[in-house]
Structure formats: C-alpha cells, structure tokens
C-alpha cells in the first residue's frame, strides 16, 4: 500500500458556500489513523461545516473527501454504512428524551448493525461504565446533569464502534464544573488510540492530547502544527490574535 492510504480522512480542496457566504474555502486536511486533530478558530470560521462535511451532513460544492478509502461523494459509496464508522458528538447532547440512557445506547446498534438486544445492552453497560455513569443506565436523560448527558452522548457514539470520533465543541454548553469530567473521557479515548477530530476552545485539552492543531478563519485553514508550535511560536497574525483572545 502506498503511504497516502494511511490517512483515514483525506480532505482535498473542499469548497462550500451558503448563498454568497463562503463557509469553506479550499480546505485540505488529512488525518492518519490514531491521530488527534484539534480544530480551533473564531465563531463562524467554518469548523462545524468542516466536521459536518466529513459525514456528509453537509454536501460540499467541490473538492473531495475520502473517509477510510471511500469517496463520500461517489454515488457508489454507501453513505449510511460509512457513517457507522464516524461517531459524532455535538455541543447539544441530542439524546433521545423518551428513551432511557441504556436505550439511547442500544437503539442504533440493534437497528443498524443487527446486534441482539442482549449484545447491545452488554456493550452499552460496558460503555456506561467506561464513562462513569453505569448507575444511570435506566433513568431518562432529563434526570442527568449536562456533563452526564454529554458522557452518555459519547458512549452512544462509541456503541457503534466507530473508527473515527468527531467532536464539535463538546463542552461549550456545559457549566464550568462539568467540563473536566467530559474532557477526562475524551482524554481516555485519545490514550486508547482513537482517531479524533475535536473542535474546542479548551486549550488545555489541545496541549495534552492534540498531535496537531489546526487554526481556521473565514472558512480557510490558516495555520497548522503541533501544540508546541501553536503555543510558543504561532506564525500567522490572525492565529496570534485569536490565541491572544482565548488564552
Ligand atoms: P463555526 O463552527 O466555526 O462557528 P460554521 O461552520 O458553523 O462555523 O459556519 C461557518 C459559516 O457558515 C458561518 O458564517 C455560518 O453562519 C454559515 N452557515 C453555517 N451553516 C449554515 C447554513 N445551514 N445556512 C447558512 N449559513 C450557514
Ligand atoms: Mg461551530
């Protein structure tokens, strides 16, 4: 296999507009298996659009996105099957309110992967244990704190055994005292080798976990490098300005 085939996500020259607004401007970004990429940038810079494009929640206007060797825009690609390889966690937890915590974790594996209810529950309980809320398996999401709900959302994504996890500002809607418990779960996941793309303003997390930090502004990737590079010697003026505002 050639070296290029090692990248599990390969985004090339992607453009996406909403009317006159250019949300993604010639974005190229690739991720290797096991790599943790943290995406930062001001509000409206295209971070969510980029993540959403990876699992085709947004359709790009031009350019290519290859996930695990498959072009997501190729009509021959089974996008629903490919989406099973991508776990996504949003700022708003989006749990099913009328299902218990455990049911939130078992619905998709039973429906989409054909697991038996018992198999899915066994996996679900293991994952709830992993995120530290096994005791909440049979309660409804509304009974949980925001931090607990977000941990359920992460466990729910993991229940599909994804190859890649996409996080879009997973702690932005949380009260400060709950941010740590969610980041801890993400750090554990990172240490276990998960491939992760994380949009976040949590620079401590970026420092600790990121193999690479990507700074976006006005729909474009402006600068990328190691956390050390970003926090000691950012080059672009816009990167410097942004970092000075959030650090
Ligand atoms: P970020 O996540 O970095 O804050 P987004 O990717 O959400 O940025 O948005 C990038 C730009 O695209 C913003 O100007 C936003 O208002 C616009 N945008 C995003 N989604 C839509 C949409 N569905 N319709 C119109 N404009 C959108
Ligand atoms: Mg966003």
Image (tube, rainbow, N blue to C red):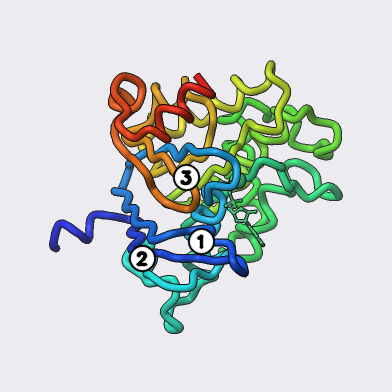
Neighbours of disc 3 within 10 Å: few (<14), some (14-19), many (20+):
many
Q: Of discs 1 and 2, which sits in the foreground?
A: 1
Residue 45, label in figure:
none
137 above or below 13? Answer: above
Q: Is residue 53 left or right of residue 181?
A: left
Q: Is mark 2 within 8 Å of ligand 1?
A: no
Q: CA distance from mark 2 to mark 3?
A: 23 Å
Q: Is residue 125 left or right of residue 70?
A: right
- The answer to whether the residues at label 1 and label 2 have Cβ atoms under 8 Å apart is no
Which of the 4 quarters of the picture holds residue 153? Answer: top right
Residue sitting at x 63%, y 31%: 171
Q: Which label's residue is closer to the chain start, 2 or 3? A: 2
Task: List the residue tagged with mark 3.
Answer: 217
Residue sitting at x 23%, y 55%: 6
Residue 53, label in figure:
1
Along the line of sight, the residue nearer the viewer: 163 or 197 = 197
Q: Residue furthest toward the top?
A: 177
Residue sitting at x 63%, y 38%: 125
Task: List the residue tagged with mark 2.
Answer: 66
Along the line of sight, the residue nearer the viewer: 240 or 3 = 240
- Residue 54 position in % (x across, y down): 47, 59
Q: Of discs 2 and 3, which sits in the foreground?
A: 3
- Residue 111 position in % (x across, y down): 65, 65
| Secondary structure type for disc 3 | strand
Q: Is residue 75 left or right of residue 10?
A: right
- Residue 98 position in % (x across, y down): 86, 50
Q: Which label's residue is closer to the chain start, 1 or 2? A: 1
């Amino acid at each position: 296999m050639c070296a290029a085939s090692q990248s599990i996500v390969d985004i090339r020259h992607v453009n996406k507009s909403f009317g006159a607004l250019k949300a993604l401007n010639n974005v190229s970004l690739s991720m290797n298996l096991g790599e943790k990429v943290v995406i930062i940038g001001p509000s409206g810079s295209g971070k969510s659009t980029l993540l959403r494009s990876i699992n085709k929640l947004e359709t790009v206007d031009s350019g290519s996105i290859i996930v695990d060797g498959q072009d997501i825009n190729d009509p021959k690609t089974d996008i629903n099957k490919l989406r099973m390889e991508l776990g996504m966690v949003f700022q708003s937890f989006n749990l099913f309110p009328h299902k218990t915590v455990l049911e939130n974790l078992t619905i998709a594996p039973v429906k989409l992967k054909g697991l038996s209810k018992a198999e899915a529950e066994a996996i679900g309980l293991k994952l709830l244990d992993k995120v530290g809320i096994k005791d909440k398996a049979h309660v409804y999401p509304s009974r949980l704190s925001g931090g607990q709900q977000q941990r359920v959302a992460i466990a729910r994504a993991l229940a599909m055994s994804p190859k890649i996890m996409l996080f879009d500002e997973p702690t932005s809607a949380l009260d400060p005292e709950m941010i740590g418990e969610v980041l801890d779960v993400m750090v554990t996941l990172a240490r276990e080798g998960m491939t992760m793309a994380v949009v976040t303003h949590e620079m401590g997390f970026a420092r600790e976990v990121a193999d690479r930090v990507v700074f976006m502004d006005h729909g474009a990737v402006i600068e990328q490098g190691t956390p050390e590079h970003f926090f000691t010697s950012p080059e672009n003026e816009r990167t410097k300005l942004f970092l000075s505002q959030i650090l």
